[in-house]
Amino acid sequence: MIDVSLLGWLVVTLTSPLSLVLLLVALGAAAYVGLTALEAAPPQRGARAVGTGAAACTLAAGMVGLRVGAGAGAVVPTAAVGIAAAAALGAIAACAWTFGARGAAALGAARVRRSAAALRAGDERRRLLAASQRAYIEGDDLAAETAAADAAVARLRAAVEALADARAALQAKRDAARGGGGPGDEGGEGEGGAMDGPRAEQRPTEASALAEDLARACDEAALKLSMGQRVLAAAEAAALRVACNAPLRRLLRRRPREATQALATLGAGALAPAAASVEAFLGEVRAARDEVAAIAAQRASDGADGASDGADGVTDGSDPEQRPAALALRELAAMESAYGALLERLRLAELHASTRASVKQVESAAGALSAAARAAALDPAELDALVTEIARAESAVAAAAPEAGGSRALAEALAAGSLALDRSDATSLSELIAALRELR
């Protein structure tokens, strides 16, 4: 029995030395597998340091606290098990570090790919949404609807023309049957004589039946042709209505609702942008009116109106004011009038706003000027005080000022003093001092 303990704690008890050998073989195999996996895997930064550190820590722990067996003979198996365990744990730690880092990198790359895919999908959705909104605003679906209506009318016109050709062919056969029946019958009677009597009696019966069938077919073809022409007239009127209403429907989509909403919420600050939007929309309305007029002129030149009016007098109505082009032009004129009035109101409101701003500036400047004028105005009380102070000062000066003779004596004394100073005359200097004392 071989006890394996770590730091005094019993870990496992081996039954025989063979078990110890098998433990060493298992630890060595784990170390070999780990090293083989590390060699096969791409090099990972820090794996060698992690494996070496784990092996060193395990070896130190084994040398300090690991005991395999008992007595003096436990040193060799303890060292062997410690070295094998250190190698195995170092290899396992390096493998865990390497493959863990690779797994984390793979997860990070997958996350980045998913994020990039989500961003691309979002960009694609935004692009498709913007494209659909642009197509809706530009009226691409309306253009496709107009083109489909024109194509359907073209197919229907081709079918009606084919029906007219079939009716013409039946009419030609009917006319040929009527024109060729008489001479054939007479010739048969003259040449065949009495032998062809029963056959001659049978031919008029067959000719009359064929003529009846041709007449019936001609009548049916004429009825179908008339119905087809009525349907064609209605289809052309519907196609003209679709083509004339397409610009109006496109304008209803492109109307400046954002500008009007901003005008309602922001007030006077949105007058200029709203006016610009409405003015641009009025330009589009005029362009749509020209487009409708061009469509009506083109359909009239192609004979669409004539076909619709000639085939059915009730489809379009004999009143030209009820035609699709006239109705569309009337709606466009009403729209232009409404938005034109709104533009005039906006311009007027903008002028009022600018006038109010100018008035506010004038009032502000006038207020500042009036405040300055009030600050610079002369106070009567201050004027009275000034006059009083001047009067008092003059009185004081008059009381303190010497007479004219004294002033003249002072001037003469000063002149004499200055001359005495120039000549260093002590007598004159003494006289100057005496005169100044007298003046005091």
Image (spheres, helix red, strand yellow):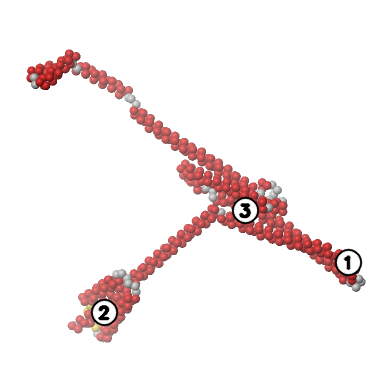
Q: Residues within 10 Å of mark 1 (few under 14, many from 20)?
A: few
Which quarter shows the C terminus? top left
Q: Secondary structure at mark 3?
A: helix
The Cα atoms of the two marked residues, 1 and 3, are separated by 62 Å
* Residue underneath mark 2: 84
What is the spatial separation of the Cα atoms under label 2 and label 3, in whole angstroms? 90 Å
Please give the count of numbered marks on the rendered protein.
Answer: 3
Q: Amino acid at mark 3?
A: Val
10 Å crowding of disc 2: few (<14), some (14-19), many (20+): many
Query: Secondary structure under badge 1?
Result: helix
**Residue 436 visible in this rendered orientation of the protein:** no
Label 1 or label 3, whichever comes before in sequence order = 1
Does 299 sit left or right of 37 as displayed? right
- State the residue position of label 1: 186
x 54%, y 50%: residue: 254
Q: Residue at x 8, y 19 (%)?
A: 425
* Amino acid at pointer 1: Glu
Foreground: 117 or 404?
A: 404
Disc 3: CA contacts within 10 A as few (<14), some (14-19) or many (>=20): many
Percent x, y of residue 179: 83, 63
Q: For mark 3, what is the residue?
A: 242
Local secondary structure at mark 2: helix
